[in-house]
Image: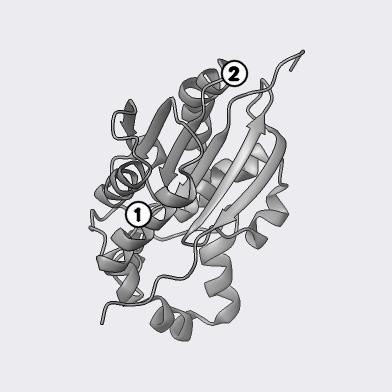
Amino acid sequence: MTGRTSGLLVIVRHGESEWNARGVWTGITDVKLDDKGHAESAQMGRLLKDIRFGHAFASSLIRTQETLDGILAAADETDVPRSISAAIRERDYGEYTGKNKWEIREAIGEDSFARLRRDWNYPVPGGETLKVVAERTVPYYLESIVPLLLQGQNVLVVAHGNSIRSLVKHIERIPDKDIAKVEMIFGRALIYTVDERGQMLTKSVRQIETVPPPA
């Protein structure tokens, strides 16, 4: 980038959903936030209140849209233009969708379970690998988000653990073999400036405090 800096790219994972709380794989099932997830979203909005956004993006799944609503309401930015896209929705977990993660770990073993959750191209019966997810998220990012950043706009993206991991792989130039080490936890905001390829120039991280469960 010659003589100028991009706007800020802020990437946030959706708050806790009803299925996250149960420890089951949600994937493309359209599940709403629970009370903790709504509280996390509001807290994230307060954490990001110093950043004025020119545009916001969420996936086609309701949990990201509810999170985005909560963030923007708490940040007093409810009039921010937004785009909703299936391109940044969560990974399809196929046959594992709706099943308890820890029961699956017991059934298939720790190594296979870790590879299923984190590896770049580990097969998922009837579902998507992280590589397949990246084949839809990265082109959308380059076509729809990066041009806004290069115009100097601050952009908020609310997505999912795996769609974010696929974007982070591109943004931070992470090799295939190392992506398994990357996890996008709840309540964390990744903040980047990027070059013309949408890759990282600078990075900072903000983290909300843990939200206690409802009484």
Q: Residue furthest right?
A: 2
Q: Which mark is residue 42?
A: 1
Closer to the eye: label 1 or 2 = 1
Locate the C terminus and report the quarter of the image it occupies: bottom left
Q: Label 2 belongs to which residue?
A: 150
Of residue 166 and residue 112, the one placed in the foreground of this image is 166
> Which numbered marker is on residue 90?
none
Q: Position of residue 157 (x, y in %)?
A: 45, 39
- Find numbered disc 1 in the image and state the secondary structure of the residue it sits on: helix
Given residues 26 and 208, the one toward you in this image is: 208
Q: Residue at x 36, y 75 (%)?
A: 23
Q: Residue at x 50, y 61 (%)?
A: 208
Residue 101 position by quadrant: bottom left
Establish if 56 lies above or below 75: above
Percent x, y for residue 202?
Answer: 72, 37
Look at 45% across and 43% down and name the residue there: 49
Tell me which residue sits at (30%, 43%) in the image: 73
Q: Amino acid at mark 2?
A: Leu
Query: Quick check: can you spot residue 126?
Result: no
User: At label 1, which amino acid type do we have?
Assistant: Ala
Residue 9 percent location from the top left of the image: 55, 34
- Which percent across, then down, holds residue 169? 63, 44
Label 1, residues with CA under 10 Å away: few <14, some 14-19, many ≥20: many
Is 138 on the left or on the right of 46, as rendered?
A: right
Please state if 166 lies on the left or on the right of 70 as rendered.
right
